[in-house]
């Protein structure tokens, strides 16, 4: 039977139309033809300097660019855009794996159904409570909860109950103020339930945008339905979830195809809903229980990884960009100023593991952690690099989500909220959780950054709130 031909349409609700294979392949051909075309590349860079983004086709041209001076400009411009929209702020979070029971057969994930020797675990509500207290005692305020797809072991009711448990825990000065959710594609009805439960961002990685590759990598289980998975963000936004987070797992398929696909996905969400992705994640395939990344022949070098981050930042300047502990300290450091605005710290990818580290013989991890530093060590490192580690959740709690958040961000007005909120939440961390050296570095950064705030009213109020935090009060926000 002849395969149906789809026409590219970013406003369409059909996956094969807004992530259109023919359009991607034509864009890749165009990029290959113009990778040394100075006139074309300079025109794209001139457009990019307006900081309103560039198209998927233009982005792939920059990715392929072989001209030395233009490549330097790509890096410089990515840094400028990152500074313009996000300044020196780096938002901190941690994943919390609730369960690794899964019915899918994904070839790149150790949770796949055929893996009979991985330790299968599911946290009880009391275990979740203890894990959250441990995370609060580190200083975390923002979590991303994760669970395998299993309608029996991990039904939506379990996820909802877990969210309620997490939000209910107030331990000493600790509180989880934003719960982001990374679970399998589901129905509009279930997305409405997640919205009502007060989630922050709904996160779902596409893994690969190449339909053929996707179907080979997902031979069994509900996740094998490419269209249902790819159209999940549409259902989530139709259900009222304002903030969604996209991502691909680089290394499964060709990185050029994936870069083009994820920017097309952002363009689709903008075209259909007027709001692009709140975040884009850029994980790379890494070792896990029975997963050898060398078995996938699309691995990318650190240099290509860095260029991907820079090009996404230029193409989608407003989006938050996330890099996890899959990456080493050295790798994370290189991409921070190229576009990354969120990182995890002190992470565990096992089911539980924050109260007490999991014994090696009970491995339940989804992937091996490369950056194994504690949260305090990560915060100290960021401060030493001149960044502001931020535990802020104010926009979510003040209703600045979706199009409201994006309008403020794109206009530059968000800095009047984000900068002081970052400093205040850093002050909370320093007072309650930091080591002496981290506290000393952090106090210096707060003093310096307060002086940079240009709005005199905001500056005065922020200084007042920071002094109130020092006196024992908590949870101020603009």
Image (cartoon, grey):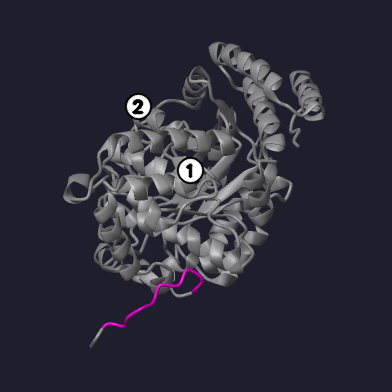
Binning the other alpha carbons within 10 Å of mark 2 as few (below 14), some (14 to 19) or many (20 upward) gives: few
Q: Residue furthest front?
A: 39
Above or below: residue 331 compared with residue 177 = above
Of 435 and 279, which appears nearest the observer? 279
Quadrant assignment, res 72? top left
Tag 1's secondary structure?
strand
Of 216 and 349, which appears nearest the observer? 216
Indicate the quadrant containing the C terminus: top left, top right, bottom left or bottom right: top right
Q: Is residue 369 visible?
A: no
The percent position of residue 262, horizontal first and vertical second, equals: 41, 56
Residue 167 on the magenta segment: no
Tag 2's secondary structure?
helix
Binning the other alpha carbons within 10 Å of mark 1 as few (below 14), some (14 to 19) or many (20 upward) gives: many
Q: CA distance from mark 1 to mark 2?
A: 17 Å
In the image, taking residue 351 as reference, residue 84 lies left or right, namely: right
Of 48 and 157, which appears nearest the observer? 48
Residue located beneath label 2 in the image: 330
Residue 4 on the magenta segment: yes
Q: Main secondary structure of the magenta part?
A: loop
Q: Is residue 377 visible?
A: yes
The percent position of residue 378, horizontal first and vertical second, equals: 47, 25
Residue located beneath label 1 in the image: 321
The span shown in magenta is: 3-12
């Amino acid at each position: 039977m002849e395969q149906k031909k789809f026409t590219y349409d970013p406003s369409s609700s059909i996956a094969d139309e807004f992530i259109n294979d023919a359009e991607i392949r034509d864009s890749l051909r165009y990029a290959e033809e113009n990778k040394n075309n100075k006139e074309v590349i300079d025109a794209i860079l001139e457009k990019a300097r307006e900081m309103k983004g560039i198209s998927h086709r233009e982005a792939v041209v920059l990715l392929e660019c072989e001209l030395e001076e233009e490549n330097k400009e790509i890096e410089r411009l990515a840094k400028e855009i990152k500074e313009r929209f996000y300044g020196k702020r780096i938002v901190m979070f941690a994943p919390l794996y609730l369960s690794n029971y899964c019915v899918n057969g994904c070839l790149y994930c150790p949770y796949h159904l055929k893996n009979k020797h991985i330790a299968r675990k599911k946290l009880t509500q009391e275990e979740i409570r203890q894990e959250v207290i441990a995370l609060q005692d580190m200083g975390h305020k923002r979590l991303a909860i994760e669970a395998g797809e299993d309608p029996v072991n991990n039904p939506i009711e379990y996820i909802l109950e877990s969210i309620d448990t997490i939000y209910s825990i107030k331990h000493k000065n600790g509180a989880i103020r934003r719960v982001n959710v990374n679970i399998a594609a589901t129905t509009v009805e279930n997305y409405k339930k997640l919205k009502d439960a007060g989630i922050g961002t709904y996160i779902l990685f596409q893994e690969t945008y190449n339909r053929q590759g996707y179907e080979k990598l997902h031979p069994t289980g509900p996740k094998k339905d490419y269209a249902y998975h790819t159209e999940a963000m549409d259902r989530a936004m139709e259900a009222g979830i304002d903030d969604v987070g996209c991502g691909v797992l680089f290394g499964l398929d060709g990185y050029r195809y994936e870069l083009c696909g994820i920017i097309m996905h952002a363009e689709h969400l903008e075209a259909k809903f007027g709001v692009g992705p709140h975040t884009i994640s850029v994980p790379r395939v890494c070792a896990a229980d029975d997963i050898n990344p060398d078995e996938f022949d699309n691995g990318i070098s650190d240099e290509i990884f860095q260029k991907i981050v820079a090009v996404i930042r230029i193409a989608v300047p407003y989006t938050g960009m996330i890099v996890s502990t899959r990456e080493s300290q050295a790798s994370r450091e290189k991409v921070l100023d190229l576009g990354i605005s969120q990182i995890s710290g002190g992470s565990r990818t096992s089911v539980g593991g924050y109260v007490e580290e999991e014994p090696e013989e009970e491995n339940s991890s989804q992937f091996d952690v490369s950056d194994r530093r504690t949260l305090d060590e990560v915060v100290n490192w960021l401060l030493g690099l001149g960044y502001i580690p931020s535990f802020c959740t104010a926009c979510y709690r003040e209703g600045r989500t979706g199009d409201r958040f994006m309008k403020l961000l794109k206009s530059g007005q968000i800095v009047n909220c984000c900068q002081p909120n970052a400093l205040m939440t850093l002050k909370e961390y320093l007072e309650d959780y930091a080591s002496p050296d981290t506290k000393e570095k952090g106090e210096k950064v707060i003093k310096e950054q307060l002086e940079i705030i240009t709005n005199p009213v905001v500056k005065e109020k922020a200084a007042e709130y920071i002094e109130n935090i020092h006196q024992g009060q908590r949870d101020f926000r603009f």
